[in-house]
Image: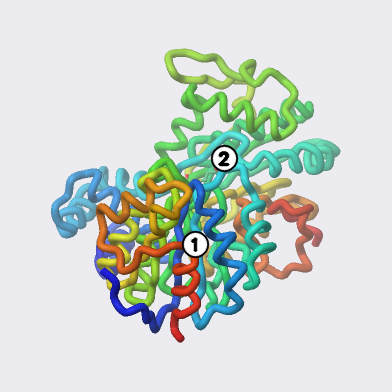
Amino acid sequence: MEKSKIISGCKVVIIGGSAGSLNALMQILPEISKLNGFAIVIVLHRKSTDDQTLEELLALKASIAVKPVEDKVVLKPGFIYVAPSNYHLLFEKNETLSLDTSEKVNYSRPSIDVSFESAAEVYGQTLVGILLSGSNSDGTNGLKAIKASGGTIVVQDPDFADMSFMPNNAIQNTTPDFVLNNSELLELIISINN
Amino acid sequence: MIEDIELETLINDVYEYYGFDFGSYSRASLKRRVSRVIALDGFKHFHEFLSKVRYDPEYYKRMVDEITVNVTEMFRDPAFYTVVRNEILPLLGTKPFIRLWHAGCSTGEEVYSMAIMLKEAGLLHKCLIYATDINATVLETAKQGIFPLRMMKEYSENYRDAGGQEDFSSYYIANYGIAKFNEELAQKMVFSQHNLVSDTSFNEFDMILCRNVLIYFDNNLQKRVINLFDESLAVLGFLALGTKETIKYSIAMDKYKQLDKEKIWRKVK
Ligand SMILES: C[S@@+](CC[C@H](N)C(=O)[O-])C[C@H]1O[C@@H](n2cnc3c(N)ncnc32)[C@H](O)[C@@H]1O
């Protein structure tokens, strides 16, 4: 399963998570001081009424700037983008993000599958998808799509996830390139494009 | 998922056969929607779907209904409605007559939300509310003011969060899974089909609401539509967009002043 840990030519790291994933992010993000030529996009299940708290929390903890996501914002390397509540987040060919209010998928909006699939279409091999803790099956199909278009897929080690269902479901139904605990995830992200 | 080239073929054919231009729609969403309708209707091959669209105008209509995203809610984003209630309605109320336009109103939940607030502010009697959409099917629902009963709990919470003080259930009659809103609310509403891509301005308004419609358009079309709204808005009128949409790339910002943190702008000149 472990292929060489060197990922190069990466443009986007997309991270999906549900219950318990914020904990992992709070451990990982503060330790990253710079992104080597790629952007991080975070898609978490969140309350539809949560307007800004998640962005504010992440901005407070992360040392890299968190860009607010509005419709058609340009995705630039070096920044963190967070999917807003109550919209699906999609990727356009001209490297902008767009939003969509269509039906929930896996009871979720934003849905991880929707964003992962859309990112896979645009970024192919230059995409890394990471799925964290959660108690929902969202994300598994998205990882499949990323893999199918040549990207790298990573799953949080269920033994170290607050909620193991989501990563377990992904491991059972896909072939992850890496299954990692939080400090290994951090190491991997820092090593990208180095 | 269909291929990019298939999507472009569909867009070209629809334009050629029906004159409707989806060319400026955001591709990521459009591609998902078209793929979804192909799967939903059981087409095995893209070309079968394409010839059905070409030669069957009824099916073309269905396709358009299915690829437009019509998801909507009453009092979606209560903070937005709170600002409308507290800051905008008092200003509009000083006018002898108030014209509003909901562009892309879908099944009308937003229009009824507005009518409830106008009624509570004692303004509904002097309003005219135009509500338009490209999709004729959703407009039929909107005219009837019939929404799913199972949504009422959430809507009444939204209503309360938006500063509503009345008993929300007094605005509708519940019956077999549906909530039929009082006809009094609909008295000042005019529903009609209007296409933001190709139709022109048709009146002058004191407030235009177009929420979560521009997200389906590319930057160029967004700019054109914002300019259409600008032409249709009286000086000192208000333009309201969805929480993640902006006018700032589309129009000279010295003409507009934003209210608070909400996506509401006042035309100042
Ligand atoms: C997501 S709904 C927005 C409903 C409501 N305004 C809200 O925010 O809840 C988007 C609506 O835009 C309409 N629409 C899409 N393209 C349009 C066009 N070219 N002209 C007018 N309406 C359009 C769709 O039919 C759909 O009903």
Local packing at callout 2 (Cα closer than 10 Å; few below 14, some 14-19, many 20+) is many
The image position of residue B232, as x and y in percent, is 66, 54
Looking at the rendered structure, which numbered label has been put on residue B131? 2
| Quarter of the view holding residue B255 | bottom right
Local packing at callout 1 (Cα closer than 10 Å; few below 14, some 14-19, many 20+) is many
Q: Is residue A80 visible?
A: yes
Secondary structure of the residue carrying numbered label 1:
strand
The image position of residue B119, as x and y in percent, is 72, 26
Label 1 amino acid?
A: Ser
Q: Residue at x 74, y 52 (%)?
A: B234
Q: Using the image, determine if residue B256 lies above or below residue B53.
A: below
Secondary structure of the residue carrying numbered label 2:
strand
Location of mark 1 (residue): A98
Q: Is mark 2 within 8 Å of ligand 1?
A: no
The image position of residue A193, as x and y in percent, is 44, 84
- Quick check: A127 left or right of B139? left
Work out how far the residue at label 1 is from the one at label 2, CA to CA, in angstroms. Answer: 25 Å
Q: Mark 1 vs mark 2: same chain?
A: no
Number of numbered discs overlaid on the protein picture: 2
Q: Residue at x 39, y 53 (%)?
A: A158
Label 2 amino acid?
A: Ala
Q: Residue furthest bottom?
A: A194
**Colouring of the image:** rainbow
Q: Residue furthest right?
A: B94
- Quick check: A138 left or right of B179? left
